[in-house]
Amino acid sequence: MLDRFQLEAFATVAEYGSFEQAANALHITRGAVSQRIKALEEALSTVLLVRERPALPTAAGEVVLRHVKALRLLEHDVYVSLKLRTSGHERTPIAIAVNSDSLATWFDRCSEALLQQLPVALEINVDDQDHTRHMLTRGDVTGCISTESRPSQGFNAISLGSMMYRCAATPAFAQRYFPRGLTSHDAKSAPAVLFNRKDSLHDTFLKSMFGVELKQFPRHYFPSPSALLNAIRSGNGYGLVPAQQAEELFASGQLVDLAPQEGLCIPLFWHHWQQEPPLARQVTEFVVEFARAELGQTGRQCAAAGDAKEVGAVTI
């Protein structure tokens, strides 16, 4: 049987990316942390950590990290079953990965409701939708939202629905840069607002609009949904905005839809462990049910909008 103290030392280093921080968290010396991990590696006859800055789990380490997280969740169920939930066991830490646009729209309400119903201490990791899955396979999180429909080995993927994006700009910006409407010629010189350099949503939209890739155009990067939207509202550029955020701004006239017949629908999937401890399974069931209720209307909009494009995995 694997030593629990050794497992916790390894997992804490993997989570913090630092032997020093792990030692502080565990209230032991850095030397004790190193000794425990070395003993665990010897017991398993494999290297579990890449000892760099930050320290990262190896492929074998990722397997062990998932094992430790599962043990923590199973321990929670023991306390619940034995009715031993003291103040130290009121909430069990559980980490999930969410894309920024979901967090800025429907998932904010989802997390609020989840914390009211389940005894978890929630850690939300944010990344682009095409990158959250790597956190799951590494063992950093127990579930994630991704645009990828195919699960990795040992995991399942459940369809959540789709998010619709609209191409938005201020009326003054639209008049200045797109006096004849959104055209490929004008799009080459109009500044676009993107999330970051990994964001391929705008490129995907332009290709769906014009049938060709437009790689050369001015770009601003604002790496938060609210900052991106504010940059568009300030007239600094145009860009793709979740329909849930754009609807009121279109209705008030603050923004205009540059392509009212060309919305972009992005399907979302919840990836999770195939073998889930009971508490992790409850989180999966809650997120899936909430997402389908929230994104159901968007799905109907995507189905009704004949010209709205639905794409597979893109980086957003």
Image (cartoon, helix red, strand yellow):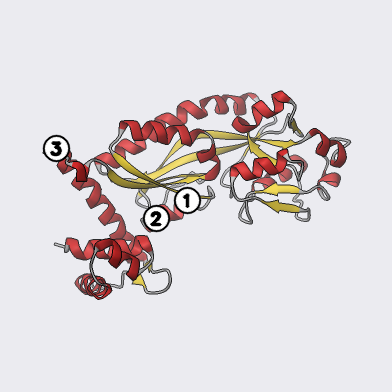
Query: Who is closer to the viewer here, 54 or 309?
Result: 54
* The N terminus, quarter of image: bottom left
Left or right of 306 on screen, residue 138:
left
Left or right of 72 on screen, residue 253:
right
Viewer-nearest of discs 2 and 3 = 3
Residue at 50% from the left image edge and 40% from the top image edge: 103
Which amino acid lies under the numbered mark 1 shown in the image of this protein?
Thr
Viewer-nearest of discs 3 and 1 = 3
Could you classify mark 3 by the number of other residues whose Cα lies within 10 Å: few (under 14), some (14-19), or many (20 or more)?
Answer: few
Counting from the top left corner in percent of width and height, residue 174 is at: 82, 37
Residue furthest left as drawn: 82
Figure quadrant of residue 68: bottom left
Kindly indicate whether the residue at mark 1 contacts the one at mark 2 (C-beta within 8 angstroms): no
Q: CA distance from mark 3 to mark 1?
A: 33 Å
Q: Is residue 294 above or below residue 312?
A: above
Left or right of 260 on screen, residue 76:
left
Query: Who is closer to the viewer here, 47 or 112?
Result: 112
Kindly indicate whether the residue at mark 1 contacts the one at mark 3 (C-beta within 8 angstroms): no
Residue 208 appears anywhere in the view: no
Residue at 40% from the left image edge and 52% from the top image edge: 136
Which amino acid lies under the numbered mark 3 shown in the image of this protein?
Ser
Q: Secondary structure at mark 2?
A: helix
Residue beneath disc 2: 137
Residue 94 appears anywhere in the view: yes
Viewer-nearest of discs 2 and 1 = 1
Residue beneath disc 3: 81
Query: Who is closer to the viewer here, 147 or 108?
Result: 108
Which amino acid lies under the numbered mark 2 shown in the image of this protein?
Thr
Q: Is residue 246 above or below residue 47?
A: above
